[in-house]
Image: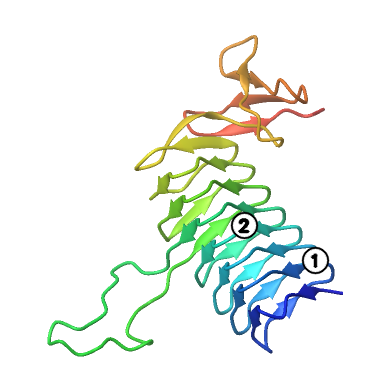
Amino acid sequence: MAKINPSADVAESAQIGEGSSVWHLAQVREDAVLGKNCVVGRGAYVGTGVVMGDNCKLQNYALVYEPARLENGVFVGPAAVFTNDHYPRAIEPDGRLKRADDWEPVGVTCLEGSAIGARAVCVAPVTIGRWAMVAAGAVVIKDVPDFALVVGVPARRVGWVGRRGVPLQAAEGPGHWVCPDSGDRFVEDGPDRLIELEGN
């Protein structure tokens, strides 16, 4: 059974998975889908039709605008923002207020296990790769490879991380990396592609 705080605003058409929690003052909009065991923190926002897999965590005041898609196990840190408009404007050139259907929404996609740090901004359309890590305060304007660690404004890759989020260390052989925590091993396949080796 899902746990929804009385102060949360959850649309009747939203689907909240078994074991999920929606905390104080959070808003989950129409037709949003949350998988099992998700956490939506205080004041967080989940836009219309956003889809989240199982075991996702949105920390306090995270803003996930439609049409974002989050696979299983995605972490979105406090006050992180996913945008959804190429060319945001409140009014037309002649001063008329823009209508809801005057623009084409674009979304952020977060693949399995990826993590977005506190106050990071992901500028749609971008894809955050599997198990990638976006540092706190980064501004992502292009796709992030699997296992990449990106930092800064605009975000750039400064290293690799494993499934546990720990930065990888160089191993024997060119382009070979190892997780100091798990012992999992990886090899680079080009400048921005990392592959897990079999047997991890």
Is residue 185 shown left or right of residue 100? right
192 up-or-down from 96: above or below: above
The answer to which image quadrant residue 10 occupies is bottom right
The answer to which image quadrant residue 86 occupies is bottom left
Kind of residue sitting beneath label 2: Gln
62 up-or-down from 99: above or below: above
Which residue is pictured at 70% across the width and 24% down the height?
Answer: 179
Return the residue nearer the eye: 27 or 140: 27
1 vs 2, front mark: 2
Which residue is pictured at 43% across the width and 44% down the height?
Answer: 138
Circle 2 residue: 59
Which residue is pictured at 67% across the width and 32% down the height?
Answer: 162
For marks 1 and 2 on the same chain, the one whose residue lies earlier in the sequence: 1
Neighbourhood count class around disc 2 (C-alpha, 10 Å): few under 14, some 14–19, many 20 upward = many
Q: How far from the left and from the top, in percent, is residue 124?
A: 42, 61
Which residue is pictured at 65% across the width and 63% down the height?
Answer: 41
44 up-or-down from 8: above or below: above
Q: How far from the left and from the top, in percent, is residue 183?
A: 77, 22
131 up-or-down from 77: above or below: above
Kind of residue sitting beneath label 1: Lys
Circle 1 residue: 36
The answer to which image quadrant residue 161 occupies is top right
| Quadrant location, the C terminus | top right
Q: Which mark is residue 116?
A: none
Q: How far from the left and from the top, in percent, is residue 47?
A: 54, 75
| Quadrant location, the N terminus | bottom right
Q: Residue furthest right?
A: 1
